[in-house]
Image (cartoon, helix red, strand yellow):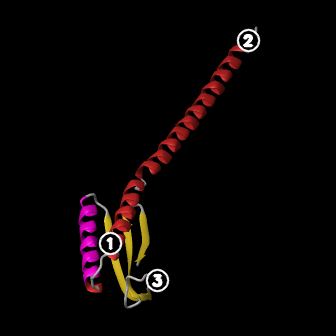
């Protein structure tokens, strides 16, 4: 009787290669999925919305703070109206934006000869903007002080 054991080694090598290929396919699949998930996180971050919200709010705060002959109540009403418009605009996109405003007016000594009283009214507008879109929460406090 002849004992031929070469066929057993071929079958064993086939099983080893198939198991190694299965492990390799699973590892490649996991690496592709982690790359996809990290790119999705980058895409889902609202960078442009936050930048636009910051820029527009900063511009609006500076414009309203530079106005002459305006009372604190008028500044507050204008900024509350601005906050309501922001809330409505971002709500159309499924995002929540809230604002809170604090306005103070003070006098400082003038250094120019044009002001006969020697004092200037300084309006400081501080606004806190909160942004939430379901995954990202962002809060920023912007302040403007103009003479």
What range is drawn magenta here? 74-92
Alpha carbon separation for disc pair 3 and 1: 39 Å
Picture disc at residue 38: none
In the picture, which quadrant includes the C terminus?
bottom left
Look at the picture and state if 71 lies above or below 130.
below
Neighbor class of circle 3 (other Cα within 10 Å; few <14, some 14-19, many 20+) is few
Q: CA distance from mark 1 to mark 2?
A: 81 Å
Q: Nearer the viewer, mark 3 or mark 1?
A: 3
Residue 32 appears anywhere in the view: yes
Between residue 114 and residue 140, name the one nearer to us.
114
Residue 104 lies within the magenta run: no
Q: What residue is shown with label 1?
A: 98
Point 28% across, 66% down: residue = 86
Residue 45's spot in the image, x, y percent? 43, 54
- Residue 59: % across, % down: 35, 66
Q: Please tell me in which quadrant of the rendered image residue 16 appears.
A: top right
* In the rendered image, the vertical position of residue 81 relative to residue 41, given as above or below: below
Q: Quadrant of residue 75?
A: bottom left
- Quarter holding the N terminus? top right
Task: Write the residue at 24% across / 59% down.
Answer: 92
Residue receiving disc 2: 4
């Amino acid at each position: 009787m002849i004992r031929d054991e070469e066929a057993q080694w071929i079958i064993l090598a086939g099983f080893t290669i198939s198991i190694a290929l299965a492990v390799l396919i699973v590892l490649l699949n996991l690496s592709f999925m982690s790359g996809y998930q990290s790119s999705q996180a980058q895409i889902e971050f609202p960078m442009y919305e936050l930048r636009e919200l910051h820029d527009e709010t900063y511009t609006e705060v500076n414009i309203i703070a530079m106005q002459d002959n305006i009372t604190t109540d008028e500044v507050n009403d204008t900024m509350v109206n601005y906050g309501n418009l922001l809330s409505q605009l971002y709500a159309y996109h499924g995002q929540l934006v809230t604002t809170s405003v604090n306005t103070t007016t003070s006098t400082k000594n003038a250094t120019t000869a044009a002001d006969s009283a020697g004092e200037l009214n300084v309006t400081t507008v501080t606004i806190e903007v909160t942004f939430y879109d379901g995954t990202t929460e962002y809060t920023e406090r912007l302040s403007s002080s103009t003479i």
